[in-house]
Amino acid sequence: MTKILRLILGDQLHHGHSWFQKVDASVHYVMMEIRPEATYVRHHIQKIIAFFLAMRAFAQSRQEAGHIFHYYALNDPENRQSLEGNILQLIEKEGFTHFEYLLPDEYRLDKQLQEISQSLPIPARADDTEHFLTSREALGHFFKGKKTYLLESFYRDIRRRFQILMEGDEPLTGRWNYDAENRRAYDGKVPIPSPPLFDRNVEELVAMIEKAGIPTLGHLNAQCFPWPVTREESLQTLYFFVEKALPFFGTYQDAMVPDEPFLFHSRLSFALNTKLLSPMEVIQAAIAAWEKQPAQIHIAQLEGFVRQIAGWREYMRGVYWANMPGYAQKNYFEHQAELPHFYWTGETRMQCLSQAIGQSLSQAYAHHIQRLMLTGNFALLAGVHPDAVDEWYLGIYIDAIEWVEITNTRGMSQYADGGLVATKPYVSSANYIDKMSTYCRNCYYDKKKRYGPKACPFNSLYWEFYERHTDKLARNARIGMAYRNLQKMDSDEKAKIMAQAQFYRQNLNSL
Ligand code: FAD
Ligand code: SF4
């Protein structure tokens, strides 16, 4: 008699998956909280809690729908603390004849599950997660033979194929891209909405994690855990976003405001990455809100948001699968420095970094521009080894899963792939940070000074970065201006800037 064991990983919480279309007593599901997944990097405590809560709630909801689940909690004495150990234990105990799993999003787990499948005493097969708009291989095929992958062409192809904001082959509103209308600094004119924060008591879970000796980072208020971890909470967060924040999403997408971590961002990345929400339903909810209130939501806001989900998210996944495992070793600039200590504490006199890191430690969240133009920018200017940068990003953020973390960090932010993802390195001096935020107003450092006492570290490091990497960057047409300015610079001035940068690079931990 056929008896199937199906594995669900912690980021495969897709309620609408075809596996759950009908209840079948010969099919059992297994989910497990295991030590290697909680320790492959030092994770933020909120991230571990969010995964365990979401997994438990998912198993419970599927059980309530009639499906048979085996759930190994971290402290279950029967938990063998490995995928293979628990799968084998269940096969022995329950006499399964077939093993099935959903294709993992991570290369590491993909390889591991292929190996486990080959070693099992019963036949095994993998199914698609039915989550993404494109297949793992789509981007590799789309850009076959190309040195750079242009997001725009891939994004337009997705828009055409799925008829997202389209009229036949053309964009519905006549334009593909509204970037020029977005990305302003926040001027305080529009009140920032307060997102739904779910105040679950997680003291028991925290105690279990501590007892198991799982190393974590960051802070948590165990009496009120704020992240959406169920399907209902995820939908609530989505509907709140499209109604209250989407009308200003694009405009303030790049703005940074002290003590306002979320601004007009959606906070949906955890729900999306664990598949509690599907990308298409998120896009459709945003489009429906725009259709319902066209006077409140300008197309620029909507297109800016759709681009993140249908464009960037699918694109990063494609980059990952087209380039792993080699991508994890890329270090184009051969950077070797250690990550400064203050990335783990937020204790630096640089106000922008103190805010962005402090917030990441307290919320397990920073929005895209804080990740790219503050923490990422500084790490790149300081010449930090991409392994150390990756480790930090993979641990600290609630939404960090390798396929989307490494492509954003090593690719977009650190340019360690030599320009596959980004057409130029995302670096800036204090000028950009001051334009997009108010951090500089309360900073120990002087945003205008390039050398001398209290000179903003971003300024000298910015010029020294370009000088140091002239051979690798000077021919890039997109940064020609920086090199022209460097050439025109007075030689005394330049020497002082370079000396200042050297000093800062040698004393990163005391900034
Ligand atoms: P919003 O600003 O509201 O955007 C909506 C959604 O669009 C996000 O939820 C996300 O699903 C998607 N999205 C937006 N930008 C990107 C992008 N560049 N790549 C992929 N999806 C995108 N995102 C992760 O999900 N996991 C990560 O580990 C991660 N690491 C990052 C590291 C660096 C250095 C940088 C620069 C970006 C990283 N991002 C990552 C992308 C982005 O910063 C987050 O998706 C976003 O901040 C999540 O917050 P939100 O849900 O409020 O997003
Ligand atoms: Fe950051 Fe420099 Fe501005 Fe200070 S002056 S907040 S270090 S950019």
Image: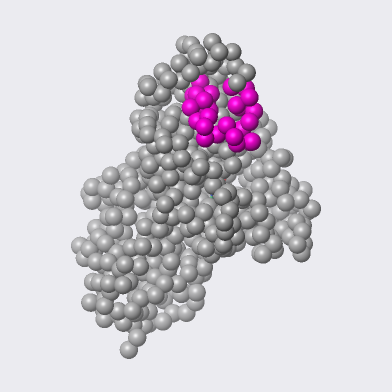
Q: Is residue 75 left or right of residue 154?
A: left
Q: In this view, does 93 lie above or below 461?
A: below
Q: Which residue is drawn at 54% across and 47% down?
A: 420
Along the line of sight, which residue is nearer the eye, 72 or 175? 175
Q: In this view, does 279 lie to the left or right of 216?
A: right
Q: In this view, does 279 lie above or below 511?
A: below
The magenta region covers: 460-486
Q: Is residue 292 left or right of residue 15?
A: right
Determine if residue 305 is in view: yes
Q: Where is residue 122 in the image (x, y as percent from the top left)?
A: 30, 79
Verify whether residue 480 appears in magenta.
yes
Along the line of sight, which residue is nearer the eye, 80 or 480? 480
Colouring convention used in this rendered image of the protein: one colour
Q: Residue at x 48, y 18 (%)?
A: 498
Q: Which residue lies furthest to the bottom in this view?
A: 1
Q: Residue furthest right?
A: 174
Q: Which residue is drawn at 54% across and 16% down?
A: 494
Q: Position of residue 315 (x, y in %)?
A: 56, 54
Image quadrant assignment for residue 188:
top right
Q: Where is residue 106 in the image (x, y as percent from the top left)?
A: 41, 58
Along the line of sight, which residue is nearer the eye, 258 or 174? 174
Q: Position of residue 373 (x, y in %)?
A: 53, 34
Determine if residue 396 is in view: no
- Quadrant showing the C terminus: top left
Verify whether residue 216 appears in magenta.
no
Q: Is residue 198 above or below residue 188?
A: below
Q: Which residue is drawn at 59% across and 42% down?
A: 423
Main SS, magenta residues: helix
- Quadrant showing the N terminus: bottom left
Total marks drawn? 0
